[in-house]
Every structure is written in structure tokens, then in C-alpha cells.
Image: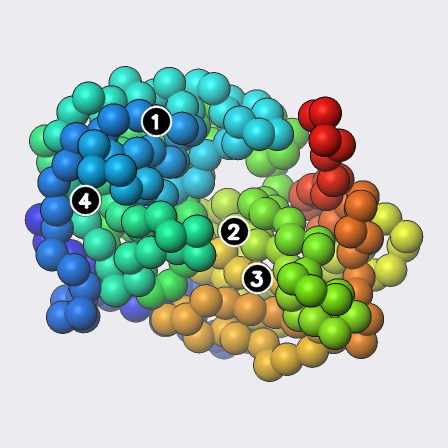
Amino acid sequence: MAHLRLLTLIVLGCGLSGLALATSAPPSSAPAPTKAVVASVYDGDTMTLDTGDKVRVSGVNTPELKPLEAYGPQARDATAEFVLGKEITLLYGEVNRDGYGRLLAWVRVDGKPLELELLERGLGHVFLIPPVEIGDVGEMLATQGRARAAKRGIWSTENYQGSLHITSFHANAPGDDRENVNGEYLRVCNVLTEPVNLDGYRMNNTSGRSFPLPAVIVPPGYTFKVISGKGEHVSDTQQQLEVYLGSDSPIWNNSKDRATIYDRYGKVVDARDHEVQSATD
């Protein structure tokens, strides 16, 4: 299986005019592919191997089960049908563990990519965190585009009608929020099949504070972090894209808040709630 690295070149003229993609060999530090049998499936993009390792599937993001999101159970069932009890091949990039200690891997069954199966059914969206070293991104985006046009699965819901989708909301920074403003962040994904220029977009909290987003261009399928405090925006697509809201103080309420993204025309693009669950939930 060829390992592909996506090198993204943004071409700017009098605005956004194109996106070119090229490929090259992955770094030699990437682990060799491995094989294992899937012992259990937690949700559409998370599984446990017979070795005891947990795997976060690369390249795709599926709806959550906790809290329950539309098409979360269907995504879990589709993944279970595809991999449960079967020997899979795991392909790794240079970054092969996430912050939770899970393996990050592209999953294949008899050479067939799990991410394409989920994208075809509308049970997930392309989800890329640089460096992107494996996977046919063009085919993934084309598959997602067909599912979106047909309004299959998640594309039939109101949460996936805009250009961006908030995939996670970390309102409570580690430690004292006042001393760690940059510990507050959201992860957002471009769910279109074309680049999005964030210039003119805004992010609001429930109390009405509003923050403009910078003119960073997000390639299709790529994620970016929206960080509350100050820092230098990262627009290099070989790194995790980052934008900073520039606040001197925490933005998000640790108990309950809502992040809302507006486009340059004032239309709501997406919103996500943060709420601490009670001990009985």
C-alpha cells in the first residue's frame, strides 16, 4: 500500500484562486504497517484490538455516542460490520499516538479503506490533522461530496449544512483558566470540498463576546484549532492549523456555554454546546 503525503499549495491572486495537491514519500520515522484482529468497536472511529490497543481511525470523524449525536449508532454499526472480528491492516503516519494514548491509524480490510466506507454512507466527514501522510485525499473528498449532494446520513441534518463543523469544545482549560487562557480551545473542520478563507468569520460565546477570525485558508477536510488567548496564527498546512482569538482572559464558561461561528454574511455556520454533566448523568 503506497503511503501518500499531502502537500497543499494555496494559490492566491486577487483572493483564493485554487488548491494544488502533490504527494511524496512519508518520513522514514513512520512505523511499519501492522496487522491485528478487532476485538470491539466503541463508535464509528474508535475500536479496540485483540492486543488491547485502542485505535482512533485516521482520516474520518464520525458522530459521537456520548452525548448522542444523529447517526452515531449507525456509524458505530457500520464500522462494526466492516471490521469486528476481522484481521485489519493499520497504516501509520509519523504521529501514531494521540493525546489519549490511542493508536492513530488508517484502517484497511482486505485492502479496502474504512474511511471511504463511512464517507460513502454519509456516516462521517473527512478529518485531517497535519502532517497528512497516507490516504487518497482526492478520492475521500469526492466520496464525501457525493454523499453530501445526496443528503445521506449526517448531511441530512442541520449540523452539517455549513462550511465548518465544530468537532470538539474544550471550554475548561487545565489548571487555573486565568493562568492558562490558551488551554481553552475548539477544534473545527472544513467540511466542504473546497478551501475556506476564514476572513470575515466570527466566533461568539453565550454572553455575547465576539471575536473575528483571521484570514487563514483552511484546505478541504482539514481541521484547525481556535485558541482563546494570544499567539501567532499557524497557516502552514504541514502543521496543525491554529488561530488565536487574542483574549487576555478566559472566554468560555466552564459550566455551560455555547460557541457559535458566523460567516462573513452574519449567517450561523455551526454551534456547539459545552455543559458539565451531573454525577447522575
Q: Are marks 4 and 3 in contact (CB under 8 Å)?
A: no
Q: Position of residue 280 (x, y in %)?
A: 72, 25
Q: Are marks 1 and 3 in contact (CB under 8 Å)?
A: no
User: Of tags 4 and 2, which is closer to the observer?
Assistant: 4
Amino acid under label 3? Lys
The residue at which mark 3 appears reads as: 225
The residue at which mark 2 appears reads as: 190
Amino acid under label 1? Val
Q: Secondary structure at mark 4?
A: strand
Q: Residue at x 30, y 34 (%)?
A: 48
Q: Secondary structure at mark 1?
A: strand
Q: Are marks 4 and 1 in contact (CB under 8 Å)?
A: no
Q: Earlier in the sequence, mark 1 or mark 3?
A: 1
10 Å neighbourhood of mark 3: few (<14), some, or many (≥20)? many
Q: CA distance from mark 4 to mark 3?
A: 27 Å
Q: Residue at x 42, y 64 (%)?
A: 18
Q: CA distance from mark 4 to mark 1?
A: 15 Å
Q: Earlier in the sequence, mark 4 or mark 2?
A: 4
Q: CA distance from mark 4 to mark 2?
A: 25 Å
Q: Position of residue 53 (x, y in %)?
A: 28, 42
Q: CA distance from mark 2 to mark 3?
A: 12 Å
Q: Earlier in the sequence, mark 2 or mark 1?
A: 1
On residue 41, the disc is: 1
